Image (cartoon, rainbow, N blue to C red):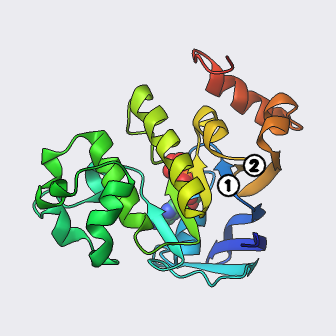
Amino acid sequence: MGELRCRSLKILRDDELFVDISFVIDRSLALVGESGSGKSLTLKALLGMLPKGFRVQMECESDFALIRGRTLGYVPQNPFTALSPLTKIEDQWIVATEKAAHMMEQVGLDAELLKRFPPELSGGQLQRVVIAMALASAPKLLLLDEPTTALDADLRTVVVKLLLELQRRLEFKMLFVTHDISTAAKLCDEITVIRSGKVMESGAMERVLSHPASEYTKALIEANFANREFRK
Ligand SMILES: Nc1ncnc2c1ncn2[C@@H]1O[C@H](COP(=O)(O)OP(=O)(O)OP(=O)(O)O)[C@@H](O)[C@H]1O
C-alpha cells in the first residue's frame, strides 16, 4: 500500500484560515500540537465531519479513496463517551456487524462482552471495543484522536502495544493526533508538529525528538517529558 500524501489541506470558515498544512502518511504519522492547533479539525476534515460553516480544500493523493467507515476508521478521544451507556455494545456495532465477535477476539476481549452495556466495562476494555469497531471495516487508515489521554499510564502502554500489534497483523496506516509526544513516539515512525494550523517541522520521529529544528518543537518536547519516566 502506497503512502497518503496531502500536499495541501486547508480548513476555512468564511475567509478565516484555521488550518493550512501538508503531510505524508507512510506507515504511521503523529500530528502533534498544543490545544487549539487544529488537530481535531484536520481529522474531521479527512472524515468529512467538519462542523457547520467550515470547509476544506484538500489536495491529497493515495491509492485508496477516503471514506469514513470503509477505508477510514476512527477512534475518538474518550472511550467513556464514545458509546451510548444505555445501549448494549452489540446494538451499537454499525459497520461489519458479522465481524463483531471476531474483532472482539482480535483486540483480546471475550465476545460475550458484546452483550453488555458500556458502563459494565472498564476504561481499557471500552477502548479496545472502540478500536475493534474502528477496524471492523478493514480500513486502510486508522485515525486516532488522542485515544489514550483518558487512560492512566499503564493502560496507555497497553493500548499502544495493542495498536502496534494490530497494525502488524492487519496492515493499516495510522494518523495519531495528540499533544502527548511520549505516546506518539512509542506509536509512530514519523511526526508533524503543528502550531496555530501551520506546520512547524516534520520528519522521522527519532530525528525530530533528538534534534528538533525549531525552538517551538524543543519547548514542546521539554514540556512533555518533564516529570516523565520516558527517555529510558
Ligand atoms: N466548532 C467550532 N467552531 C468554532 N471554532 C472551532 C470549532 N472547532 C474548532 N474551532 C477552532 O479551531 C481551532 C482548532 O481547533 P481544534 O479543535 O482542531 O484544535 P486541537 O488541536 O484539536 O485542540 P485540542 O488538543 O484541545 O483538542 C481552534 O482555534 C478552535 O477554537
Query: In the depicted view, which residue is nearer to us: 44 or 93?
Result: 93
**Position above or below: 5 against 79:** below
The residue where tag 2 is placed is 190
Q: Would the CB of label 1 be found within 8 Å of ligand 1? A: no
Q: Position of residue 207 (x, y in %)?
A: 85, 37
Amino acid type of disc 1?
Answer: Ser
Image point (60%, 65%), residue name: 42
Query: In the depicted view, which residue is nearer to us: 84 or 51?
Result: 84
**Label 2 close to label 1 by CB (< 8 Å):** yes
The residue where tag 1 is placed is 28
Q: Where the N terminus falls, by quadrant?
A: bottom right
Image point (51%, 56%), residue name: 144
Tell whether 44 sits left or right of 77.
Answer: right
**Position above or below: 223 against 52:** above
Q: How many marks?
A: 2
Amino acid type of disc 2?
Answer: Glu
